[in-house]
Amino acid sequence: MEISEVRVKLVTDKDERLKGFCSITMDREFLVRDIKIIEGTGGPFVAMPSRKMCDHCKRCGAKNHLKARFCNDCGAKLKENRARRKYRGKVKLHADVAHPVNAEFRKKLHDQIIAAFNAEVEKSKEPDYEPTELDGMDEDIPEVV
């Protein structure tokens, strides 16, 4: 699988660990949005798009995030520590929406995204810099009726 396009949008808040968002196109046919570039202790790393894990209220059945203490609909107190534990005992509060299946593609993806991020950082230093637009990546895709 070839990564045919990488677009990076920098985050302007310099105090945040989140440094940018990225969208990639693979084989000119498959788009993945909302990949995060985060500043870690060993340099920037790539975090794949994820969603918050939810469960349902025992009283009314409404959907609530696992960190919620009270139900969004009926206000009932929710049981604490409802989240499953991952390896090493960490609480699992998010689930990947998309992610590489093997280490080889993960490295390839990481290297290309970080290279595009570094290039965008350099471009941002130019006086006439225009931030990259991530929403325009699917302009050539025909509408499905």
Image (spheres, rainbow, N blue to C red):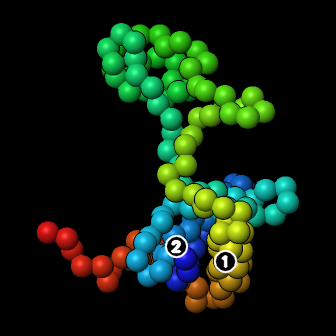
Q: Position of residue 30 (x, y in %)?
A: 43, 72
For mark 2, give the secondary structure: strand
Q: Which residue is mark 2?
A: 24
Instruction: Look at the numbered discs 1 and 2 and tell me whether their residues touch, using CB distance below 8 Å.
Output: yes
Q: Nearer the viewer, residue 88 or 94?
A: 88
Residue plotted at (64% across, 57% down): 47
Residue plotted at (58% across, 25% down): 83
Image quadrant assignment for residue 102: bottom right
Q: Position of residue 107 (x, y in %)?
A: 72, 69
Q: Position of residue 48 (x, y in %)?
A: 59, 57
Q: Does 49 sit above or below residue 93?
A: below
The quarter of the picture where the C terminus appears is: bottom left
Describe residue 122's horizontal placement relative to residue 128 as left or right: right
Describe residue 56's horizontal placement relative to residue 93 as left or right: left
Residue plotted at (79% across, 56% down): 40
Q: Answer yes or no: is residue 115 visible.
A: yes
Q: Does 85 sit above or below residue 26?
A: above
Q: Which residue is mark 1?
A: 112
Q: Does 47 sit above or below residue 56?
A: below
- The type of residue carrying mark 1 is Gln
Q: Position of residue 62 (x, y in %)?
A: 34, 22
Which residue is at the far left?
145
Q: Does 91 sit above or below residue 5?
A: above
Crowding at mark 2 (Cα within 10 Å: few <14, some 14-19, many 20+): many
- The earlier-in-sequence mark between 1 and 2 is 2
Residue plotted at (85% across, 60% down): 42
Which residue is at the far right?
42
